[in-house]
């Protein structure tokens, strides 16, 4: 579809093109400045003396080394307004990156375990999503994630606690420590969520093997795979992803910071796209990984030499892979085409 775009104009096009973000943990958008502000507001003691000291701790070697700091950062969230402020700050950034739709993961167990009521979490996030739709033109929705290092019984209890607010989230996901916690562990709770008509996604193939991606698809019956970059090691799995148009929500800067790839130039996003996989670009935990959505696009394109056709494909995939209604998807796609026509 896109006309040839000179390389010099590609960064402006990447920034301007309308897009959807399908893989953002809202707790991972908590910037160190806001962590300190909320800690002060709520009287929470932090094990870091300053914003700079906290930022210096953001040197990760793998997923677990990040998760330990990420859960500590979330400990400052106590009141509904805290959840609102966190989500609103992200949604402002999303609007600036020309995000038309954002599907926000949240980790309720991180908060309920500290005594924060489920209602506080969901209502604060939901209010920010509602305001974003009206004030920012960003269609924001929530996806509740179960922590896979906890038990399936705890996931069931979390679902039960969230059901009074069933209309305020569109789906469920599975996140946290992947290795040693295969998707099968959550087969029954995902079956229940499916019965409830919730959309289903799961992290798989971030650090874990292709077998975890197969299990997410065949046992959990998810509609999208979060990350999924290890799928390239299994040709039959690649065929399956392409044939069934299973979206992968790829997070390049996250993969770089968590040492999934040694350099951005080694990232396999281009390989996935060129193989026909419905891959998308996402920020995962932008406050921790050095960039929001456009930064992910800009750095990845600079490192891998992808072109305007890849950019168009990625944006179109993000709308196709979203859980928006068909008429909204068409509107997003029309806006994408208009921007590409103007840049042609
Ligand atoms: N929670 C927040 N970010 C995550 C990631 N990249 N993988 C698994 N769980 C997460
Ligand atoms: Zn993630």
Image (cartoon, helix red, strand yellow):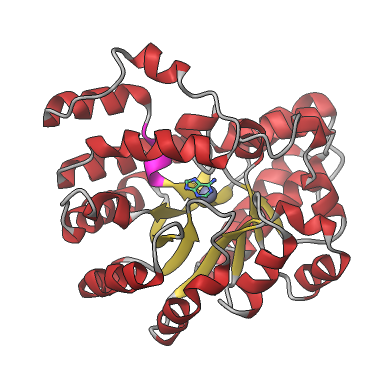
Q: Residue furthest front?
A: 180
Which is the main secondary structure of the residues drawn in magenta? helix
Q: Is residue 289 above or below residue 328?
A: above
Q: Is residue 17 above or below residue 57?
A: below
From the image, which quarter does the C terminus lie in?
top right
Q: Is residue 250 magenta?
A: no
Which residue: 80% across, 41% down? 308
Q: Position of residue 295 (x, y in %)?
A: 60, 30
Which residue: 87% across, 40% down? 4
The span picked out in magenta is 26-30
Q: Tell me where residue 225 sits by quadrant.
A: bottom right
Q: Is residue 286 left or right of residue 226?
A: left
The answer to whether any part of residue 91 appears in the image is: no
Q: Tell me where residue 289 sits by quadrant.
A: top right
Q: Is residue 308 above or below residue 272?
A: above
Q: Position of residue 301 (x, y in %)?
A: 76, 34
Depth check: give the residue in front, 81 or 102: 81
């Amino acid at each position: 579809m896109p006309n040839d775009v000179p390389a010099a104009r590609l960064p402006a096009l990447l920034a301007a093109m309308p897009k959807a973000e399908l893989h953002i943990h809202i707790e991972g958008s908590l910037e160190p400045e806001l962590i300190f502000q909320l800690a002060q507001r709520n009287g929470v003691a932090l094990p870091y003396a300053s914003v700079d000291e906290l930022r210096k701790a953001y040197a990760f070697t793998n997923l677990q080394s990040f998760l330990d700091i990420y859960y500590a950062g979330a400990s400052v969230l106590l009141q509904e307004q805290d959840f609102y402020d966190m989500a609103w700050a992200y949604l402002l950034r999303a609007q600036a990156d020309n995000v038309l739709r954002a599907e926000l993961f949240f980790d309720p167990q991180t908060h309920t375990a500290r005594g924060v009521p489920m209602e506080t979490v969901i209502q604060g996030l939901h209010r920010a999503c509602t305001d974003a739709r009206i004030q920012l033109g960003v269609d924001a929705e929530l996806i509740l994630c179960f922590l896979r290092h906890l038990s399936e019984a705890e996931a069931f209890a979390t679902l039960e606690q969230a059901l009074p607010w069933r209309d305020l989230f569109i789906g469920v996901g599975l996140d946290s420590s992947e290795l040693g916690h295969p998707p099968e562990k959550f087969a029954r709770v995902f079956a229940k969520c499916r019965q409830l008509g919730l959309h289903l996604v799961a992290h798989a193939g971030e650090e874990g093997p292709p077998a975890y991606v197969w299990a997410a698809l065949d046992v959990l019956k998810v509609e999208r795979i979060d990350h999924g970059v290890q799928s390239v090691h299994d040709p039959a799995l690649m065929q399956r992803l392409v044939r069934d148009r299973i979206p992968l929500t790829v997070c390049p800067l996250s993969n770089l910071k968590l040492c999934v790839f040694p350099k951005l130039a080694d990232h396999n996003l281009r390989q996935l796209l060129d193989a026909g996989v419905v891959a998308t670009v996402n920020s995962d935990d932008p406050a921790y990984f050095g960039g929001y959505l456009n930064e992910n696009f800009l750095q990845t394109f600079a490192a891998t030499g992808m072109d305007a056709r890849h950019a168009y494909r990625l944006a179109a995939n993000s709308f196709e892979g979203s859980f928006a209604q068909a008429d909204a998807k068409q509107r997003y796609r029309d806006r994408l085409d208009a921007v590409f026509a103007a840049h042609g």
